[in-house]
């Protein structure tokens, strides 16, 4: 029961009723300009205030104050777009006015050595008196698409599609990359947290919060280094049972760990240590940001595999070869069709098309796409087949369309996931999204399709180590 | 000298003066509908004719004939959108009328077993009498963006940006994937050849032709299997000296090689055999379609590395960590800065930013991007640094822009390539392209930036085996 307190503790950060942008500016060369513009332009329904010692009545049309002490009481969220040296007193003032959460962009804290460590300690102390939750310092802030909250200085983050995948990134830059990948995959974002130096909010806090957060269905983490790894793993192990938690770790090599240290002040650990511990904690490790995005897409659509048997059919063998190659290297299987199923397929397959798995139905299946449905309907009856993959060249508006709705319904009937590799340039992302809205996990690249299946299959093995249902 | 004959031999295929679409149709459920529409709508300046036994005066507004024998003489290119059984006589008729090149979409030839092998042999014989060059059967055809030629049934291929990267793919589907990847990278396409069953045009012919073709600067191959590998390697070895040839091979695993066999009738060979032979022939092997596209982009911009020393600077450490990690795992180095260079940097770096490589200049370098130019200008003076990488979060129209032109000019001054990792969602592809037009090799993903540098560095090692300058 006590668990749920965390939802209240972070309510002012993620669902604030009011925001104050400290350091707000009308000069586009200042961070405070972008921060105020971001706060204003994402559709936030609460109150927004601007603070700047040189302010008139308004900045960018937002009611402005010269001092924090002049603000109304009990503003939920303070966004600090001010230099490092000014942060600690500004946090103290906000706490005195009843502020509950803060986002601090400035660097110059723990990541810069002993003086910075001292400054960060003072910061934590200033916040701690009032229990103010701090994101950063040294970060790009927080987004919650569900309430139009854009507490970053990146205005476009406010326009990202709403969804259930939440991202917590030690690096703001990689966080932006993850959001870009999700965008490419047509996956909606829930919350975005650039966690930076983690003054008093840790990865473990965010995992716990997001695992309980009803607006989040999948959690993505980018981790450079963790200070209290034991703590993190203990809590992650507990909460990773509730929702898929996908982590991508970097900073293993000499130079990359050097950058990580000066970046957000964390020592990167060895690859093996991380891998083993994360696996035990039930955290899914992505090998790349692409894999993270494709797995997040699968999970956000509720897709899991119950075995490593795949049926794949195509009218265009090339991409199917790429997928088969990627899958087989990783231990995924394409079981032989049972004789009676093969026989039944023979009835409707075009000339020269031999019943098999993978199944090539040639160009005839492009113009007559019902062949996909007939073949898949038969194949999914086999016990050792756990999902179906269709490979289809997008007609790109000028040719036939894939019957995504029917294909997806077929999958639901057998309780087995369906995947579509719909090869087309990015420009046709809309088509991909439409197929996805019909319930088929759709990729525009053979390699991503392969990566998704391999990633999901890997979980089968890992679940032997850590049973998610326990 | 004799070499150049091949340019004449393939002139009717790639630069036809006239095209006849056999099987042209006004019914959108027929391939011949899409084939005629494709031929018409890519800006082709020559004559186009339609052939269909049931034709009236026109099909889709194109002058139509009922029989090939009714067509004007000496039409260069015949596009066959008709069933397998009808192809051989139709090729014979075209040869009699002076046809010089043909594209055959239909399957049902060598890939379907003994009967198909016989049919394909008859096809080669029919074409051979007049020296007609055949692309296919079992393919999606040919594109030449330089003359608005779209001899496929995929209308959108006619709208792809013109450029110097030519693609030859055994699989039409993978060919489309490659084109999609090039599109994503903002790289222009030269010629596209879906080579299919290779009735009388082989990979080796296309490598030779494209190596000599002035409109092609980079050659990309997707290979499932080669029949006469010795022949291919001998000719590839000769012509890969003229231009970069990048190959991506699949079909190594059990199922994927099974599909390859039934796909275009080639037996896939073992991975090791291919790798060794290709390396000796000077062919660059891509590990994925993404790597193929990023390398093609580098080569099409004339970028090569002369050593494995990289200088990288950033305002956002995260993506730089990802790049450093990918690079260092593959043996790329980030040399220490020489003391006098480090000292000179200290003059202008923001507080807490320590001269080093990679170099983190914090958010100050985002608003004041001239720091990138100052730092890179110093670092490129070092002998053991062979290229510069800038990592920059796109302002996406609402924030600062990266000084791409000046950064590129800096590179040119030192004769060292420049790379930009401009992280942003795909929707901002235009910005990436603009930076690229300024001469900076630009990627929107840290992973692609890493892949490009690693790929280019790999060539340094491989060039020891096969000196491209000899």
Image (cartoon, coloured by chain):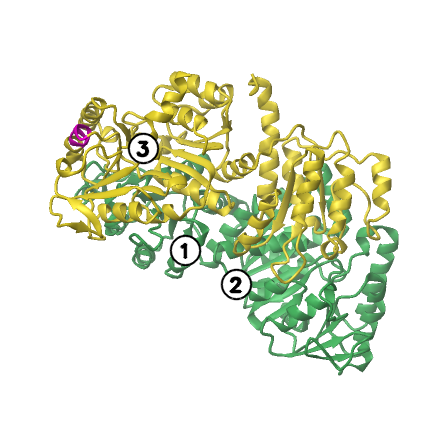
Chain colours: A yellow, B green
CA separation, marks 2 and 3?
Answer: 51 Å
Q: Is mark 1 on a helix, strand or loop?
A: helix
Q: Which residue, given by chain and number where applicable, does mark 1 sit on?
A: B432
| Left or right placement of residue A223 versus residue A240 in this view | left
Q: Is mark 2 on a helix, strand or loop?
A: strand
| Left or right placement of residue A277 versus residue B255 in this view | left
Asked if one can make out residue A176 in the rendered structure from this viewpoint, the answer is yes
Marks 1 and 2, the one that precedes in the sequence:
2
Number of the front mark, 1 or 3: 3
Find the magenta span and give its range.
Answer: A91-97
Q: Is the magenta stretch mostly helix, strand or loop?
A: helix
Q: Which residue, given by chain and number where applicable, does mark 2 sit on?
A: B164
Number of the front mark, 2 or 3: 3
Q: Which residue is drawn at 69% across and 46% down?
A: A406
Tell me the chain of label 3: A
Q: Where is residue A211 in the image (x, y as percent from the top left)?
A: 45, 26
Label 3 neighbour load within 10 Å: few <14, some 14-19, many 20+: many
Q: In which quarter of the image is residue A46?
A: top left
Quadrant that contains the N terminus of chain B: bottom right
Disc 1 + disc 3, Cβ < 8 Å: no
Q: Which residue is drawn at 39% across and 60% down?
A: B434
Q: In which quarter of the image is residue B109?
A: bottom right
Q: Where is residue A354 in the image (x, y as percent from the top left)?
A: 82, 45
Tell me the chain of label 1: B
Asked if one can make out residue A202 in the rendered structure from this viewpoint, the answer is no
Q: Which residue, given by chain and number where applicable, does mark 3 sit on?
A: A13
Tell me the chain of label 2: B
Q: Which residue is drawn at 75% across and 50% down?
A: A370
Q: Where is residue B292 in the image (x, y as percent from the top left)?
A: 54, 50
Give the label on residue B186, or none: none
Vertical placement of residue B65 versus B378, above or below: below
Q: Position of residue A314 (x, y in %)?
A: 71, 48
């Amino acid at each position: 029961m006590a668990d749920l307190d965390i939802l209240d503790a972070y309510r002012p950060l993620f669902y604030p009723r009011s925001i104050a942008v400290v350091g707000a500016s009308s000069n586009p060369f200042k961070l405070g300009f972008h921060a105020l513009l971001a706060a204003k332009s994402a559709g936030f329904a609460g109150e927004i205030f601007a603070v700047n010692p040189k302010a008139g009545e308004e900045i960018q049309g937002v009611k402005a104050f010269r001092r924090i002490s002049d603000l109304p009481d009990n503003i939920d969220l303070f966004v600090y777009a001010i230099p490092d040296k000014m942060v600690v007193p500004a946090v103290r003032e906000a706490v005195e006015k009843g502020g509950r959460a803060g986002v601090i962009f400035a660097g110059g804290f723990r990541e810069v050595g002993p003086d910075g460590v001292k400054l960060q300690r003072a910061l934590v102390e200033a916040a701690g008196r009032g229990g103010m939750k701090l994101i950063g310092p040294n970060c790009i802030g927080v987004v919650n698409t569900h309430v139009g909250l854009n507490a970053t200085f990146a205005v476009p983050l406010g326009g990202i599609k709403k969804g259930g995948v939440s991202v917590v990134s030690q690096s703001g830059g990689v966080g932006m990359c993850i959001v870009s990948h999700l965008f490419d995959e047509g996956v909606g974002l829930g919350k975005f947290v650039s966690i930076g130096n983690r003054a008093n909010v840790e990865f473990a806090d965010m995992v716990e919060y997001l695992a309980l957060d009803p607006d989040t269905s999948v959690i993505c983490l980018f981790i450079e280094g963790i200070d209290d790894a034991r703590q993190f793993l203990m809590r992650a192990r507990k909460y990773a049972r509730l929702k898929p938690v996908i982590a991508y770790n970097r900073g293993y090599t000499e130079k990359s760990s050097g950058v990580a240290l000066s970046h957000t002040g964390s020592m990167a650990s060895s690859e093996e240590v991380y891998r083993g511990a994360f696996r035990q904690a039930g955290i899914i490790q992505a090998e790349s940001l692409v894999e993270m995005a494709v797995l997040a897409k699968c999970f956000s659509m509720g897709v899991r595999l119950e075995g490593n048997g795949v049926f794949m059919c195509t009218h265009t063998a090339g991409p199917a070869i790429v997928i088969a190659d990627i899958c087989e290297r990783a231990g995924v299987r394409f079981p032989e069709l049972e004789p009676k199923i093969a026989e039944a397929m023979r009835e409707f397959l075009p000339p020269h098309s031999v019943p098999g798995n993978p199944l090539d139905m040639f160009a005839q299946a492009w113009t007559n796409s019902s062949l996909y449905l007939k073949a898949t309907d038969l194949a999914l009856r086999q016990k050792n087949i756990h999902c179906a993959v269709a490979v289809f060249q997008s007609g790109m508006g000028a040719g036939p369309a894939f019957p995504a709705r029917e294909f997806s319904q077929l999958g639901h009937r057998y309780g087995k996931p369906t995947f579509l590799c719909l090869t087309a340039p990015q420009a046709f992302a809309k088509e991909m999204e439409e197929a996805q809205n019909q319930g088929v996990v759709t990729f525009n690249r053979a390699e991503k399709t392969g990566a998704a299946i391999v990633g999901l299959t890997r979980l089968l093995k890992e679940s032997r180590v850590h049973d998610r249902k326990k």
